[in-house]
Amino acid sequence: MTDVRAPSRAAAAAGLFGLLAVLAVVIGWLALSACGLFLPGVGWLLDSCAVAAPSISQEEAERLRGATLAEEARQLERRLAQAASCPTPPPGAPLHAAAPQPPPQLAACPVRRSDRVALLLDASTSMKLSYTLDPDLERRTMEAAQKVEASGMGRASPAFAELQSLLQEMEAAPGTPRIELAKQALTQLADAADAETGFELISFAQCGPPRHQGRFSPAQRAELKRAISGTELRDSTALADAIAALPRMIPREEGAGRPLNVVLISDGNDSCGGDPCAAAAQLEQERPEINVNVLAITRSIGAIRCVADRTGGQFLQAGDAASLAPLLRTAAGQNVPDHCR
Protein backbone atom coordinates (compact mmCIF):
# COMPACT_ATOMS: atom_id res chain seq x y z
CA MET A 1 0.00 0.00 0.00
CA THR A 2 1.52 3.28 -0.96
CA ASP A 3 2.16 6.04 1.82
CA VAL A 4 0.55 9.18 0.56
CA ARG A 5 2.19 11.32 3.40
CA ALA A 6 5.77 10.99 2.05
CA PRO A 7 5.61 13.87 -0.48
CA SER A 8 4.31 16.22 2.22
CA ARG A 9 7.19 15.38 4.57
CA ALA A 10 9.73 16.05 1.86
CA ALA A 11 8.16 19.36 1.08
CA ALA A 12 8.23 20.34 4.73
CA ALA A 13 11.91 19.42 5.04
CA ALA A 14 12.77 21.38 1.95
CA GLY A 15 10.99 24.43 3.30
CA LEU A 16 12.79 24.23 6.65
CA PHE A 17 16.12 23.93 4.91
CA GLY A 18 15.40 26.98 2.83
CA LEU A 19 14.44 28.99 5.89
CA LEU A 20 17.70 28.07 7.62
CA ALA A 21 19.65 29.06 4.53
CA VAL A 22 17.99 32.47 4.48
CA LEU A 23 18.80 32.98 8.18
CA ALA A 24 22.42 32.02 7.61
CA VAL A 25 22.75 34.53 4.82
CA VAL A 26 21.22 37.30 6.92
CA ILE A 27 23.45 36.57 9.94
CA GLY A 28 26.52 36.39 7.77
CA TRP A 29 25.71 39.67 6.11
CA LEU A 30 25.21 41.35 9.51
CA ALA A 31 28.48 40.00 10.85
CA LEU A 32 30.42 41.05 7.80
CA SER A 33 28.89 44.53 7.84
CA ALA A 34 29.84 44.98 11.53
CA CYS A 35 33.42 43.85 11.96
CA GLY A 36 34.00 40.46 10.34
CA LEU A 37 33.28 36.78 10.59
CA PHE A 38 33.99 34.78 13.76
CA LEU A 39 33.59 30.99 13.94
CA PRO A 40 33.49 29.26 17.32
CA GLY A 41 36.60 27.20 17.84
CA VAL A 42 38.31 28.89 14.86
CA GLY A 43 38.32 32.63 15.62
CA TRP A 44 37.95 35.63 13.40
CA LEU A 45 38.09 34.72 9.77
CA LEU A 46 37.62 38.31 8.73
CA ASP A 47 38.11 41.32 11.11
CA SER A 48 37.36 44.62 9.49
CA CYS A 49 37.34 46.63 12.83
CA ALA A 50 40.27 45.69 14.95
CA VAL A 51 43.81 46.62 13.92
CA ALA A 52 46.43 44.54 15.58
CA ALA A 53 48.59 46.69 17.95
CA PRO A 54 52.30 46.28 17.59
CA SER A 55 53.81 44.17 20.30
CA ILE A 56 56.25 46.10 22.71
CA SER A 57 58.19 45.00 25.75
CA GLN A 58 57.31 45.96 29.31
CA GLU A 59 60.55 47.97 29.62
CA GLU A 60 59.66 49.99 26.52
CA ALA A 61 56.18 50.63 27.91
CA GLU A 62 57.62 51.94 31.21
CA ARG A 63 60.01 54.21 29.32
CA LEU A 64 57.19 55.72 27.30
CA ARG A 65 55.10 56.24 30.45
CA GLY A 66 58.03 57.97 32.21
CA ALA A 67 58.57 60.32 29.26
CA THR A 68 54.89 61.26 29.31
CA LEU A 69 54.97 62.05 33.04
CA ALA A 70 58.14 64.13 32.64
CA GLU A 71 56.54 66.23 29.91
CA GLU A 72 53.45 66.80 32.09
CA ALA A 73 55.71 67.94 34.97
CA ARG A 74 57.53 70.43 32.71
CA GLN A 75 54.23 71.90 31.54
CA LEU A 76 53.08 72.25 35.16
CA GLU A 77 56.30 74.08 36.10
CA ARG A 78 55.84 76.51 33.21
CA ARG A 79 52.28 77.28 34.32
CA LEU A 80 53.39 77.86 37.93
CA ALA A 81 56.20 80.18 36.82
CA GLN A 82 53.77 82.28 34.80
CA ALA A 83 51.21 82.46 37.62
CA ALA A 84 51.24 85.32 40.19
CA SER A 85 52.74 84.54 43.59
CA CYS A 86 49.92 84.48 46.12
CA PRO A 87 50.05 82.30 49.25
CA THR A 88 46.92 80.41 50.12
CA PRO A 89 45.14 82.11 53.04
CA PRO A 90 44.40 79.99 56.10
CA PRO A 91 40.86 78.70 56.60
CA GLY A 92 38.52 81.46 57.65
CA ALA A 93 40.93 84.29 56.78
CA PRO A 94 39.55 87.28 54.81
CA LEU A 95 40.44 87.47 51.15
CA HIS A 96 42.20 90.81 51.63
CA ALA A 97 43.84 90.36 55.01
CA ALA A 98 46.18 93.07 56.28
CA ALA A 99 49.91 92.49 56.10
CA PRO A 100 51.27 90.76 59.22
CA GLN A 101 52.64 93.18 61.79
CA PRO A 102 56.10 92.69 63.31
CA PRO A 103 56.23 91.70 66.98
CA PRO A 104 56.21 94.67 69.36
CA GLN A 105 59.65 95.92 70.28
CA LEU A 106 60.59 96.47 73.87
CA ALA A 107 61.11 100.10 74.83
CA ALA A 108 64.68 101.30 75.13
CA CYS A 109 66.23 101.70 78.57
CA PRO A 110 67.83 105.19 78.48
CA VAL A 111 68.28 105.33 82.27
CA ARG A 112 69.53 102.46 84.39
CA ARG A 113 67.55 101.50 87.46
CA SER A 114 69.55 101.51 90.69
CA ASP A 115 68.78 101.42 94.39
CA ARG A 116 71.20 104.32 94.99
CA VAL A 117 70.37 107.83 93.75
CA ALA A 118 72.40 110.98 94.37
CA LEU A 119 70.54 114.26 93.94
CA LEU A 120 72.91 117.04 92.80
CA LEU A 121 70.91 120.26 93.22
CA ASP A 122 71.90 123.65 91.83
CA ALA A 123 71.44 126.13 94.72
CA SER A 124 72.71 129.24 92.95
CA THR A 125 70.76 132.51 93.17
CA SER A 126 69.66 132.21 89.52
CA MET A 127 67.35 129.38 90.68
CA LYS A 128 65.07 132.03 92.21
CA LEU A 129 64.19 133.28 88.70
CA SER A 130 60.90 132.38 87.05
CA TYR A 131 60.73 129.06 85.24
CA THR A 132 58.77 130.75 82.44
CA LEU A 133 61.40 133.47 81.96
CA ASP A 134 61.82 134.56 78.33
CA PRO A 135 64.79 132.55 76.97
CA ASP A 136 65.84 135.47 74.78
CA LEU A 137 66.01 137.81 77.80
CA GLU A 138 68.11 135.26 79.67
CA ARG A 139 70.44 134.87 76.68
CA ARG A 140 70.97 138.64 76.34
CA THR A 141 71.70 138.93 80.06
CA MET A 142 74.33 136.20 79.92
CA GLU A 143 75.99 137.83 76.92
CA ALA A 144 76.04 141.17 78.73
CA ALA A 145 77.60 139.58 81.82
CA GLN A 146 80.30 137.91 79.73
CA LYS A 147 81.03 141.22 78.01
CA VAL A 148 81.45 143.04 81.33
CA GLU A 149 83.65 140.30 82.76
CA ALA A 150 85.86 140.09 79.67
CA SER A 151 86.36 143.87 79.38
CA GLY A 152 86.89 144.60 83.07
CA MET A 153 84.55 147.57 82.87
CA GLY A 154 83.63 149.27 86.14
CA ARG A 155 80.24 150.00 87.57
CA ALA A 156 80.14 153.35 85.84
CA SER A 157 80.40 151.87 82.33
CA PRO A 158 77.38 151.71 80.00
CA ALA A 159 77.84 147.93 79.65
CA PHE A 160 77.52 147.46 83.42
CA ALA A 161 74.42 149.66 83.49
CA GLU A 162 72.89 147.58 80.72
CA LEU A 163 73.64 144.39 82.65
CA GLN A 164 72.01 145.76 85.79
CA SER A 165 68.90 146.71 83.82
CA LEU A 166 68.63 143.21 82.32
CA LEU A 167 69.09 141.57 85.73
CA GLN A 168 66.32 143.68 87.22
CA GLU A 169 64.02 142.77 84.33
CA MET A 170 64.68 139.07 84.86
CA GLU A 171 64.07 139.26 88.60
CA ALA A 172 60.75 141.08 88.03
CA ALA A 173 59.46 138.49 85.55
CA PRO A 174 56.30 136.79 86.87
CA GLY A 175 56.10 133.06 87.47
CA THR A 176 57.07 130.34 89.95
CA PRO A 177 60.76 130.37 90.92
CA ARG A 178 62.80 127.47 89.53
CA ILE A 179 63.99 126.36 92.96
CA GLU A 180 60.40 126.00 94.16
CA LEU A 181 59.51 123.78 91.19
CA ALA A 182 62.68 121.75 91.77
CA LYS A 183 61.87 121.21 95.44
CA GLN A 184 58.30 120.18 94.61
CA ALA A 185 59.51 117.64 92.04
CA LEU A 186 62.15 116.28 94.44
CA THR A 187 59.55 115.89 97.20
CA GLN A 188 57.27 113.98 94.83
CA LEU A 189 60.22 111.76 93.89
CA ALA A 190 60.83 110.95 97.56
CA ASP A 191 57.19 109.90 97.92
CA ALA A 192 57.02 107.85 94.72
CA ALA A 193 60.43 106.11 94.76
CA ASP A 194 60.76 102.36 95.18
CA ALA A 195 60.77 101.17 98.76
CA GLU A 196 64.36 99.89 98.48
CA THR A 197 65.88 103.09 97.04
CA GLY A 198 68.24 105.21 99.13
CA PHE A 199 69.09 108.86 98.40
CA GLU A 200 71.95 111.30 98.92
CA LEU A 201 71.38 115.04 98.69
CA ILE A 202 74.23 117.28 97.51
CA SER A 203 73.83 121.00 96.73
CA PHE A 204 76.30 123.32 95.01
CA ALA A 205 76.62 127.07 94.44
CA GLN A 206 79.64 128.96 95.78
CA CYS A 207 83.01 128.25 94.19
CA GLY A 208 84.60 125.26 95.84
CA PRO A 209 83.35 121.88 97.06
CA PRO A 210 79.60 121.21 97.20
CA ARG A 211 77.58 120.58 100.34
CA HIS A 212 76.68 117.04 101.24
CA GLN A 213 73.35 117.46 103.02
CA GLY A 214 72.88 113.87 104.06
CA ARG A 215 72.58 110.20 103.15
CA PHE A 216 69.03 108.88 103.56
CA SER A 217 67.96 105.26 103.78
CA PRO A 218 64.58 104.09 102.39
CA ALA A 219 63.15 104.50 105.90
CA GLN A 220 64.24 108.16 106.09
CA ARG A 221 62.02 109.73 103.44
CA ALA A 222 60.65 112.32 105.86
CA GLU A 223 64.18 113.45 106.75
CA LEU A 224 65.04 113.64 103.03
CA LYS A 225 62.06 115.88 102.32
CA ARG A 226 63.00 118.22 105.19
CA ALA A 227 66.54 118.52 103.82
CA ILE A 228 65.20 119.32 100.36
CA SER A 229 62.91 122.00 101.74
CA GLY A 230 65.72 123.58 103.80
CA THR A 231 68.17 124.00 100.90
CA GLU A 232 69.27 127.67 100.72
CA LEU A 233 70.44 129.62 97.69
CA ARG A 234 73.93 131.09 97.47
CA ASP A 235 75.96 133.07 94.96
CA SER A 236 77.89 131.55 92.01
CA THR A 237 77.58 128.14 90.30
CA ALA A 238 80.46 125.76 90.99
CA LEU A 239 79.18 122.97 88.75
CA ALA A 240 82.56 121.53 87.72
CA ASP A 241 83.71 121.40 91.35
CA ALA A 242 80.53 119.55 92.31
CA ILE A 243 81.03 116.90 89.60
CA ALA A 244 84.70 116.45 90.52
CA ALA A 245 83.78 115.90 94.19
CA LEU A 246 81.35 113.04 93.53
CA PRO A 247 83.90 110.17 93.80
CA ARG A 248 84.93 111.40 97.26
CA MET A 249 81.44 112.16 98.53
CA ILE A 250 79.82 108.96 97.27
CA PRO A 251 81.82 105.92 98.44
CA ARG A 252 82.10 102.91 96.18
CA GLU A 253 79.96 100.05 97.39
CA GLU A 254 80.61 96.33 97.07
CA GLY A 255 79.66 94.72 93.78
CA ALA A 256 81.52 95.35 90.58
CA GLY A 257 79.62 97.57 88.15
CA ARG A 258 76.77 98.24 90.56
CA PRO A 259 75.03 101.23 88.91
CA LEU A 260 74.45 104.52 90.65
CA ASN A 261 72.30 107.32 89.23
CA VAL A 262 73.25 110.93 89.83
CA VAL A 263 70.51 113.43 88.98
CA LEU A 264 71.88 116.89 88.21
CA ILE A 265 69.21 119.61 88.48
CA SER A 266 70.54 122.91 87.18
CA ASP A 267 69.61 126.03 85.25
CA GLY A 268 72.97 127.42 84.20
CA ASN A 269 76.64 127.08 83.38
CA ASP A 270 79.66 127.03 85.66
CA SER A 271 80.50 130.55 86.88
CA CYS A 272 83.67 129.65 88.82
CA GLY A 273 85.98 129.07 85.86
CA GLY A 274 85.55 125.29 85.84
CA ASP A 275 84.92 122.96 82.90
CA PRO A 276 81.90 120.72 83.59
CA CYS A 277 82.54 118.66 80.42
CA ALA A 278 86.13 117.85 81.43
CA ALA A 279 85.03 117.07 84.98
CA ALA A 280 82.43 114.66 83.62
CA ALA A 281 85.03 112.91 81.45
CA GLN A 282 87.29 112.48 84.47
CA LEU A 283 84.39 111.12 86.53
CA GLU A 284 83.72 108.50 83.87
CA GLN A 285 87.33 107.32 84.11
CA GLU A 286 87.35 107.14 87.90
CA ARG A 287 83.85 105.80 88.52
CA PRO A 288 82.32 104.30 85.36
CA GLU A 289 79.40 102.90 87.35
CA ILE A 290 78.16 106.48 87.96
CA ASN A 291 76.02 108.01 85.23
CA VAL A 292 74.86 111.61 85.50
CA ASN A 293 71.37 112.29 84.17
CA VAL A 294 70.89 116.02 83.63
CA LEU A 295 67.49 117.63 84.17
CA ALA A 296 67.57 121.19 82.80
CA ILE A 297 65.17 123.29 84.84
CA THR A 298 64.98 126.09 82.32
CA ARG A 299 63.84 126.31 78.72
CA SER A 300 67.08 127.71 77.33
CA ILE A 301 70.00 125.69 78.72
CA GLY A 302 71.79 123.08 76.66
CA ALA A 303 75.46 123.80 77.36
CA ILE A 304 75.74 121.12 80.07
CA ARG A 305 74.44 118.35 77.81
CA CYS A 306 78.04 117.11 77.62
CA VAL A 307 77.88 116.10 81.30
CA ALA A 308 75.27 113.48 80.47
CA ASP A 309 76.92 112.44 77.22
CA ARG A 310 80.35 111.79 78.79
CA THR A 311 79.05 109.77 81.74
CA GLY A 312 76.55 107.60 79.87
CA GLY A 313 73.58 109.53 81.21
CA GLN A 314 70.63 111.28 79.63
CA PHE A 315 69.88 114.96 79.05
CA LEU A 316 66.26 115.76 79.88
CA GLN A 317 64.52 119.09 79.43
CA ALA A 318 60.95 119.79 80.46
CA GLY A 319 58.66 121.60 78.07
CA ASP A 320 56.54 122.89 80.95
CA ALA A 321 56.47 122.83 84.74
CA ALA A 322 54.00 119.93 84.86
CA SER A 323 56.48 117.58 83.18
CA LEU A 324 59.31 118.20 85.66
CA ALA A 325 58.22 115.60 88.21
CA PRO A 326 57.80 112.73 85.67
CA LEU A 327 61.15 113.60 84.08
CA LEU A 328 62.81 113.66 87.48
CA ARG A 329 61.52 110.16 88.23
CA THR A 330 62.91 109.03 84.87
CA ALA A 331 66.30 110.64 85.59
CA ALA A 332 66.43 108.87 88.96
CA GLY A 333 65.72 105.50 87.32
CA GLN A 334 62.35 105.22 89.05
CA ASN A 335 60.13 105.56 86.02
CA VAL A 336 61.47 102.94 83.60
CA PRO A 337 59.85 99.79 82.13
CA ASP A 338 59.94 96.56 84.10
CA HIS A 339 62.38 94.94 81.65
CA CYS A 340 64.91 97.68 82.51
CA ARG A 341 65.03 96.71 86.19
Image (cartoon, helix red, strand yellow):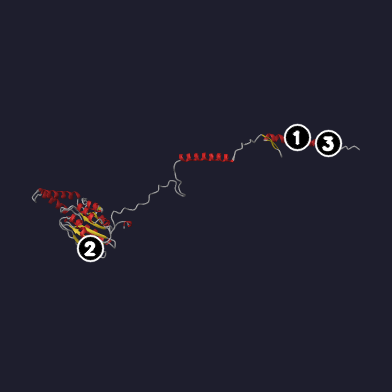
Q: Is residue 28 above or below residue 109?
A: above
Secondary structure state at the residue bearing disc 3: helix
Within 10 Å of disc 1 (Cα), the crowding (few <14, some 14-19, many 20+) is few
Residue type pointed to by label 3:
Ala
Residue 217 at what x, y percent from top left?
Answer: 25, 64
Within 10 Å of disc 3 (Cα), the crowding (few <14, some 14-19, many 20+) is few
Q: Earlier in the sequence, mark 3 or mark 1?
A: 3
Q: Is residue 103 above or below residue 43?
A: below
Secondary structure state at the residue bearing disc 2: strand
Secondary structure state at the residue bearing disc 1: helix
Q: Nearer the observer, disc 2 or disc 3?
A: 2
Residue 24 at what x, y percent from top left?
Answer: 74, 36
> In this orientation, does residue 244 appear?
yes
> In this orientation, does residue 177 appear?
no
Task: Tell me the quarter of the picture where residue 241 sits.
Answer: bottom left
Tell me how far mark 2 sits from mark 3, CA to CA. 152 Å
Residue 326 at what x, y percent from top left?
Answer: 27, 56
Within 10 Å of disc 2 (Cα), the crowding (few <14, some 14-19, many 20+) is some
Q: Earlier in the sequence, mark 2 or mark 3?
A: 3
Q: Closest to the observer: 216 or 277?
A: 277
Residue identified by numbered label 1: 22
